[in-house]
Image: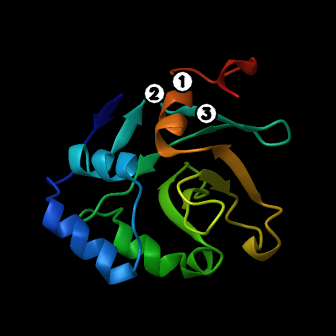
Amino acid sequence: MQMKENQERLTELRLQEFEKRYGIDLPPSYRAFLLKFNGGYPTPSFFFISDEQGVGMVNIFYGIGEMYDNLDKKMDLFDDLLEIGLFPIADDSGGNQICLGLTEGTSGQIFFWIHDEDPEDMQNVHFLAYDFEGFLGKLSDAPPFDNALR
């Protein structure tokens, strides 16, 4: 994986402070990703959502710090997601969110949330992968037109 426009370097201390501020423990693979890249525009970026929704594309992974698309701003903006146990980590070009599960039974799993629908009934939340590494492994350079990335 390559990341365009890497953000400021993230330290372990700053990451721990972020987790403490929000009362969350991020999975080791996502923590490692933040420490290495701290957000940015990924290549490859396409992924399969569902038969109904088709293909999505990661626009940007959020980072921690002073960048425009930072996790603190997203936590404030999407507090309704936090209430149902989803933590926004990235978006697509339409503002839909790629999220990390935080609740028992979904912890560490990756989901796609369609932002213009109410998240409470979970009809607009689609499972993508069992963990962050699994999600990264499903990213493709071109839109997947077969079952290879499902």
Vertical position of residue 148 compared to residue 21: above or below? above
Q: Secondary structure at mark 3?
A: strand
Q: How far apart are the alpha carbons under marks 3 and 2?
A: 9 Å
In the picture, the quarter occupied by the N terminus is top left
Viewer-nearest residue: 102 or 97? 102
Residues under labels 1 and 3: Cα distance?
A: 6 Å
Q: Which residue is mark 2?
A: 44
Q: Which quarter of the figure is the C terminus placed in?
A: top right
What amino acid is found at the position of numbered circle 2 in the picture? Pro
- Pointers 1 and 3 in contact (CB under 8 A)? yes
Q: Looking at the image, is 34 positioned above or below residue 80?
A: above
Asked whether the viewer can see residue 66, the reply is: no
Dot 1 falls on a residue whose secondary structure is loop
Q: Is residue 36 visible?
A: yes
> Which one is earlier in the sequence, the residue at label 1 or at label 2?
2
Q: Earlier in the sequence, mark 1 or mark 3?
A: 3
The residue carrying mark 3 is 47
Location of residue 27 by image quarter = bottom left
Looking at the picture, how far across and down is residue 2, in whole percent? 32, 29
Kindly indicate whether the residue at mark 2 contacts the one at mark 1 (C-beta within 8 angstroms): yes
Which residue in the structure is indicated by mark 1?
A: 140
